[in-house]
Image (cartoon, rainbow, N blue to C red):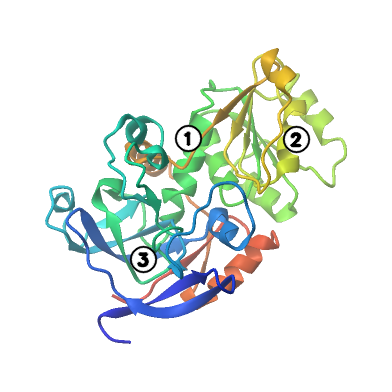
C-alpha cells in the first residue's frame, strides 16, 4: 500500500456485501479535518444497509465505506476558520452529518437531516464513513475529547452515547422515577448508565440473557427476558406501582414497540422512540387522543447537543463496553450483531501511526 492509499471496508450494493478495498486517502476541504481513525464502532444502522427497509436510509456513492461512529487524531486541516480551531495531534470525536449549513433553525434545534438547503448527506451511507484508516470530517461537527475519554475506545459515544444520553434526558424525568430501557445492547447499556447517573430507577428488558447480564453490570435495578418470562409485564407493573414513567426503546423490534404501552403508567407516561424497526410503527390513535401515554422521539444528535452528552459522559465516567476487532474482521462483527451474540458495542482499533 502506498502512502497515498488506505484500506477501507466498503459496502457494494451490486452484491450486497462488504469488500476490503484499497482506496485513496482523502484531502480535507476548507472546512474539514483529516483524521487518522483510532476507533470505529459498529451501529445497528450500519447493518440496515444490508437489509430491505423503508425507513429512509439512502445509499449515495457505490461502493461506500460504512461506519458513522468513530474517534481519531487530527493529522491535517483545511484553511477555513472552523478547521483552524483545531490543531494537528488533537484527539477528536465527531458526528456524521455533512454538506448541511449547520446554521439554520433545523440544524440548530432539530436535526441536520432537515437542513433547509436539502443537501445533507450522512457519512457511512451516502458518503464514505469511518471503517477506513483516514477520514475527512466537518470541523463544525467535531470536538476535542475531554480529559478522561480515551481516543482508542470512545468511538461509541459519538453516536450511541449521544443518542442514549438524549434518549434518557429528553424524557425529562425526576430522580427516583422509573424508566424502562428496552434493548440492553449497544445503545441500551449506555442508556442504563446515563439513567443511573441521573438518579433514575431502571428496568432493563431484552431477549438475550447476555444483554441482561450487561444491564445488571451497568446498574439496572431489575431485568427481564421478555421471551422467557411470560409474566414480565405484570411484574413491571407491580414493581413500579402501575407502570414506568417512561419506556425508552433502543431496539429495532416492532414487537417490542407493540409491547410498550402495557407497561407505561397511564395518563402521564412516555414512549420514547429511538430504535428504528424495519417496518413502520403502529400506534392506537385512541390511546394517544385520550392521553393514555405520550410519544416522543430522540435522535443521534447535532453538533449543538453533542457536547453536553460527551461532557456528561466524561464527568460521570460513562464507559462504552466494547469488544475490539481488526478491520478485516468487520464481517464477523456484523454476523455477531445479527445473531444477538454481542455484548455492548463492537469496534475496530486501528493500529500504527
Q: Quadrant of residue 64?
A: bottom left
SS of the residue at dot 3? strand
Left-right relation of 319 to 229: left
Whole-number angstrom distance, CA of label 2 to CA of label 3: 39 Å
Res 265 label: none
Camera-side mark, 1 or 2: 2
- Is residue 146 visible in the rendered image? The answer is no
Res 258 label: 2
Percent coordinates x, y for residue 283 in the rendering: 71, 29
Residue under the image location 71 percent in, 21 percent down? 285
Q: Which residue is mark 3?
A: 38
Percent coordinates x, y for residue 288 in the rendering: 68, 19
* Of the image marks 2 and 3, the number of the one nearer the N terminus: 3
* Of the image marks 1 and 2, the number of the one nearer the N terminus: 1
Q: Which residue is mark 1?
A: 166
Is 122 located above or below residue 110 in the figure?
A: below
Left-right relation of 220 to 148: right
Q: Quadrant of the C terminus?
A: bottom left
SS of the residue at dot 1? helix
Whole-number angstrom distance, CA of label 1 to CA of label 3: 25 Å
Amino acid at each position: 500500500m502506498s502512502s497515498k492509499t488506505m484500506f477501507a471496508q466498503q459496502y457494494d450494493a451490486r452484491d450486497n456485501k462488504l469488500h476490503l478495498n484499497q482506496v485513496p486517502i482523502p484531502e480535507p476541504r476548507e472546512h474539514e479535518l483529516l483524521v487518522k481513525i483510532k476507533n470505529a464502532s459498529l451501529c445497528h444502522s450500519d447493518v440496515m444497509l444490508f437489509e430491505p427497509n423503508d425507513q429512509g436510509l439512502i445509499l449515495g456513492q457505490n461502493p461506500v465505506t460504512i461506519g458513522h461512529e468513530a474517534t481519531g487524531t487530527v493529522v491535517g486541516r483545511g484553511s477555513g476558520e472552523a478547521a483552524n480551531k483545531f490543531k494537528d495531534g488533537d484527539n477528536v470525536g465527531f458526528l456524521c452529518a455533512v454538506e448541511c449549513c449547520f446554521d439554520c433553525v433545523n440544524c440548530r434545534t432539530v436535526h441536520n437531516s432537515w437542513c433547509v438547503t436539502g443537501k445533507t448527506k450522512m457519512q457511512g451511507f451516502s458518503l464514505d464513513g469511518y471503517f477506513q484508516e483516514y477520514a475527512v470530517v466537518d470541523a463544525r461537527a467535531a470536538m476535542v475529547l475531554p480529559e478522561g475519554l480515551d481516543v482508542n475506545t470512545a468511538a461509541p459515544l459519538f453516536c450511541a452515547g449521544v443518542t442514549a444520553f438524549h434518549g434518557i434526558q429528553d424524557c425529562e424525568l425526576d430522580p427516583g422515577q422509573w424508566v424502562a430501557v428496552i434493548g440492553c445492547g449497544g445503545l441500551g447499556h449506555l442508556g442504563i448508565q446515563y439513567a443511573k447517573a441521573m438518579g433514575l430507577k431502571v428496568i432493563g428488558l431484552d431477549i438475550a440473557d447476555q444483554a441482561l447480564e450487561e444491564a445488571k453490570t451497568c446498574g439496572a435495578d431489575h431485568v427481564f427476558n421478555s421471551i422467557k418470562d411470560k409474566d414480565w409485564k405484570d411484574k413491571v407493573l407491580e414493581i413500579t406501582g402501575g407502570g414506568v414513567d417512561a419506556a425508552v426503546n433502543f431496539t429495532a423490534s416492532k414487537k417490542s414497540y407493540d409491547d410498550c404501552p402495557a407497561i407505561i403508567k397511564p395518563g402521564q407516561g412516555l414512549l420514547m422512540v429511538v430504535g428504528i424497526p424495519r417496518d413502520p410503527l403502529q400506534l392506537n390513535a385512541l390511546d394517544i387522543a385520550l392521553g393514555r401515554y405520550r410519544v416522543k422521539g430522540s435522535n443521534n444528535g447535532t453538533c449543538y447537543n453533542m457536547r453536553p452528552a460527551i461532557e456528561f459522559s466524561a464527568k460521570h465516567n460513562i464507559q462504552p463496553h466494547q469488544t475490539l476487532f481488526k478491520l478485516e474482521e468487520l464481517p464477523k462483527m456484523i454476523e455477531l450483531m445479527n445473531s444477538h451474540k454481542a455484548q455492548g458495542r463492537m469496534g475496530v482499533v486501528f493500529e500504527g501511526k
